[in-house]
Image (cartoon, helix red, strand yellow):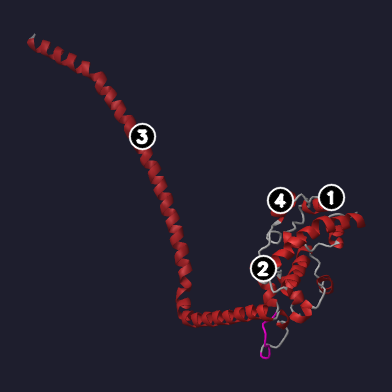
Amino acid sequence: EENNEANWKLCHETLKEFPAAASAKRQKVEELKETITDEEKQLEALQRSIQKHKEELEELESSMRILPALEADCPAMSCLAKEISVVEDELLEAVLSCLEKDPYDFSAESDEKETRAFPPLSLVFNAVGLSSQTISCLSDLDGQEFLDSNPVTLCDDNLITDLIQRKEVAYLHHMLSFKQVPYSRHSCVVCDCNAQELKSLVQEHEKEDPVTSAILSNDSVSITGRQFLLLDRNDIRKHFFEDISAKQYRDFKKQTQNYFWLIHKQSLLK
């Protein structure tokens, strides 16, 4: 009996503790599952990282295949780059000197390099951002031919039809005659305007009229301040206001364009 009582007591104690032990084991199982899930995610991330690094390594090793050849050519290439840099510096100095002294002295691209005493005008075309096509069309001009020509006729004769390029050529012609190239020499509230800023400037000065509104509301042709100054009646009729009358153009010219042209001229004289 004593053994039986002892066994029942032990059974009672064991059974009393079983729910807590079972709960602890269930919690441990859940914790282990969560741990395994987290570690699997970490493993996947690590595998992705390893794969990315392998791809980067492969790309880098592939790019390094040409290193021996480059290392062999490097001294000669370095010398060539230095020579080109010296030539560029000399050209820049020559261009700036010609701009300052007499823009008429610029040579044409077609002049023989051996006998060319002055830098080609095409360097100026490139510096102010004319398109490669426009530069090609005008490359045979020297400074005197360019400045002695009417910009509209010049563009017509050289088949430059794009409105923006035509106005840029006209603006360069105007600014070169005042020796205001590079354009950074010239601080002008009108010339510095992009298309959106020009709209704000016109509104600020209360110079809106039907013609100006037609020009500024045309989303297909964005006109900057400096291009706006040089628009003529043919430009407006062709691109902005097909039925513009002579009076409408005169009013636009007198009340708006000349107003901003005066601001521009005053900035040139400062």
Query: Nearer the observer, disc 3 or disc 4?
Result: 4
Give the magenta-colored segment's residue range. 114-120
Identify the disc placed on residue 18.
none
Find disc 2 in the rendering and name its residue: 183
Q: Crowdedness of circle 3 by 10 Å Cα count: few (<14), some, many (20+)?
A: few
First in sequence: mark 1 vs mark 2: 2
Query: Nearer the observer, disc 2 or disc 3?
Result: 2
Picture coordinates of residue 45 (x, y %)?
41, 46
Marks 2 and 3 sit apart, C-alpha to C-alpha, by 68 Å
Q: Secondary structure at mark 2?
A: helix
Marks 3 and 4 sit apart, C-alpha to C-alpha, by 62 Å
> In this rendering, is residue 31 above or below 204?
above
Identify the disc placed on residue 210.
1
> In this rendering, is residue 224 above or below 134?
above
The reply, left or right, for residue 107 in relation to residue 21 is right
Q: Quadrant of residue 100?
A: bottom right
